[in-house]
Amino acid sequence: MSVDVPTYTAEQVRAAERPLLEAGVPLMRRAAAALADVVRAELAGTPSAPITSSIVLEPLLQDDPDTPQPRVLALVGSGDNGGDALYAAAGIGDIADVDVLLVGSRVHESAFAAAVAAGARRIDLPEVRDARYALVLDGILGIGASRDPALHGLAREAVTTVQSLAQTRRGMPRVIAVDLPSGLHPDTGAADEAVLAASLTVTVGAAKSGLARAPELVGEVVLVDLGLPLDGVEPAGSMAVSRVIPAR
């Protein structure tokens, strides 16, 4: 079962967020808490929405205390998506071993400190090539990249490295995109080849119009409702999401 929701442009979402941010509403922490809940459910093999197909998730968490915890890779960019991913990493530190790859020019310091305090460890790109991950959290770019969504430099190299895992015996890990797959234009859905196709996209605040235009890249979509003041805003369109969850 799915839910039809309106879609909005990146600028419409930014404008709706602005008064809440100016009022000190902790949107990032609320979004990250919901994201962490979704990641925990995914690691436990519990679908984040009612199953509508014959696909059944294999649990990634094991009951045997001697079995290693699942390993998660967080790809972290400079902006709010990176902060969301880091706070979510802090929220799953008790059930997963989290590696953090910083691919931006800066990092959200408080979120990074929270992730490290919860047991996450910073790694470099060569370590990704040799690792086996159960899940990748894609927090590189979000709606702030609407002018030029294409990935460059280390961010692009990180994505192509993860993509190459599908060609090895380790196989492609599940991918959860934070807000939208990095490299996807939030309004048009345009993208080049350096985009991680998501198993699940956790879009925050409102569904972005580009998600509806690239279903092959976004996978299942879950909307985190942050209570943005969008009632008087004309939507750009609409799309079906698997469910809407309120931020806590």
Image (cartoon, rainbow, N blue to C red):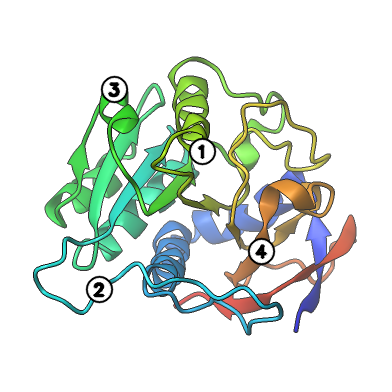
Comparing marks 3 and 2, which lies closer to the viewer?
Answer: 2
Q: Nearer the viewer, residue 70 or 180?
A: 70
Mark 1 or mark 4, earlier in chain: 1
- At mark 4, the secondary structure is strand
* Picture residue at 31% right of the left edge, 55% below the top: 89
* Picture residue at 45% right of the left edge, 49% below the top: 173
Q: Which mark is residue 220?
A: 4
Image height of 247 relative to 129, above or below:
below
Separation of residues labelled 1 and 2 (CA atoms): 24 Å
Q: Which mark is residue 166?
A: 1
The residue under label 2 is 62
Mark 1 or mark 3, earlier in chain: 3
Horizontal and vertical percent position of residue 78: 43, 32
The residue under label 3 is 126
Residue 235 in sight here: no
Residue 159 shown left or right of residue 97 in the figure: right
- At mark 1, the secondary structure is helix
Q: Residues within 10 Å of mark 3 (few under 14, many from 20)?
A: few
Q: Quadrant of the C terminus?
A: bottom left
Mark 3 or mark 2, earlier in chain: 2
Q: Are marks 1 and 4 in contact (CB under 8 Å)?
A: no
Q: Nearer the viewer, residue 165 or 91?
A: 165
Mark 4 or mark 2, earlier in chain: 2
Q: Nearer the viewer, residue 228 or 92?
A: 92
Mark 3 or mark 4, earlier in chain: 3
Comparing marks 1 and 3, which lies closer to the viewer?
Answer: 1
- Identified by mark 3, the residue type is Pro
Separation of residues labelled 4 and 2 (CA atoms): 24 Å
- Identified by mark 4, the residue type is Glu
Horizontal and vertical percent position of residue 168: 44, 34
- Identified by mark 1, the residue type is Ala
Separation of residues labelled 3 and 2 (CA atoms): 28 Å
